Image (cartoon, rainbow, N blue to C red):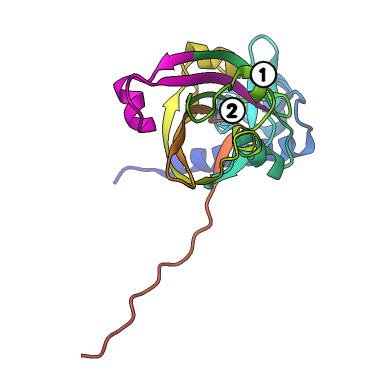
């Protein structure tokens, strides 16, 4: 049997260093620089390679952030998002962050077959397409592309959506209430456009959201495709034990 004692000791040492770095991070403020490797390695009594490995993992987890040519800094806390039909603006407010948006592109397109199926409209119908950068506390969080049938929201333009919630706009301007929807979430990586807007390296881990929402009359009012930063988002789901079927007498 191979001797794994050395390997086990290395793993234990690595996790110990990772915990010590986290303790150090807890003493710092968001945006503070982590001391350089040449100072931390002797402080923790490890090689720079071991230290670098632990730091890289914390960067991947979003606890730390690297800035080219500047160093490694303490990242802001992740925004926890529950699975519910809420707008980005409402969700950020519930978590103590200030939401804002920057409208990038607004145009009218024909639905075509794929988008028409999602919106349950004719391929020849007009659709408003709005691409926005969504921010929380002025930090970029997501790139969102909203598709709305023009018949649902006549007159909708970029100014109406500036720093506002589309759901609130539906209610206040168009008198529509949401009844629910279907949302899918999958892992992805950022492309060049998304990376530049979100301020992350190319092919950074991200979450891809696709959501279709309906009003109380059953009409589809939106199809949204959003790419969220993986280093700043996490999901919170409350779990309940499954109910056991009642026993029946034989």
Q: Position of residue 182 (x, y in %)?
A: 42, 43
- Of 228 and 114, the residue lying toward us: 114
The mark found on residue 178 in the picture is none
Query: Is 113 left, or right, of 132 in this rendering?
Result: left
- The quadrant holding residue 137 is top right
Q: Position of residue 158 (x, y in %)?
A: 62, 18
Image quarter of residue 126: top left
The magenta segment: 108-135
For residue 59, the mark is 2
Q: Nearer the viewer, residue 122 or 213?
A: 122
Residue situated in front as seen by the camera: 109 or 237: 109
* Mark 1 crowd level (few <14, some 14–19, many ≥20, 10 Å Cα): few
Q: Which residue is mark 1?
A: 159
Cα separation between marks 2 and 1? 37 Å
- The reply to whether residue 16 is visible in this rendering is no
Q: What is the quadrant of the C terminus in the image?
A: bottom left
Tag 2–tag 1 contact (CB < 8 Å): no
């Amino acid at each position: 049997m191979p001797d794994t004692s050395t390997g086990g000791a290395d793993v234990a040492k690595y996790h110990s260093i990772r915990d010590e770095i986290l303790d150090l991070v807890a003493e710092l403020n968001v945006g503070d620089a982590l001391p350089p490797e040449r100072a931390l390695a002797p402080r923790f009594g490890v090689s720079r390679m071991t230290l670098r490995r632990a730091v890289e993992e914390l960067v991947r987890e979003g606890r730390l952030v690297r800035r080219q040519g500047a160093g490694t800094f303490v990242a802001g806390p992740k925004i926890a998002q529950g699975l519910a039909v809420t707008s980005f603006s409402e969700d950020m407010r519930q978590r103590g962050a200030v939401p804002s948006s920057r409208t990038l592109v607004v145009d009218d397109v024909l639905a075509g077959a794929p988008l028409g199926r999602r919106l349950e409209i004719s391929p020849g119908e007009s659709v408003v397409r709005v691409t926005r950068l969504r921010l929380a506390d002025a930090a970029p969080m997501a790139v969102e592309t909203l598709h709305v049938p023009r018949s649902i929201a006549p007159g909708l333009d970029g100014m109406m959506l500036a720093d506002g919630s589309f759901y609130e706009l539906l209610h206040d301007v168009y008198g529509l209430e949401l009844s629910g929807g279907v949302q899918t979430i999958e892992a992805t990586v950022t492309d060049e456009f998304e990376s530049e807007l979100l301020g992350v390296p190319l092919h950074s881990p991200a979450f891809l959201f696709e959501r279709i929402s309906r009003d109380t009359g059953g009409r589809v009012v939106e199809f949204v495709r959003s790419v969220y930063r993986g280093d700043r988002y996490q999901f919170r789901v409350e779990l309940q034990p499954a109910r056991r079927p009642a026993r029946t007498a034989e």
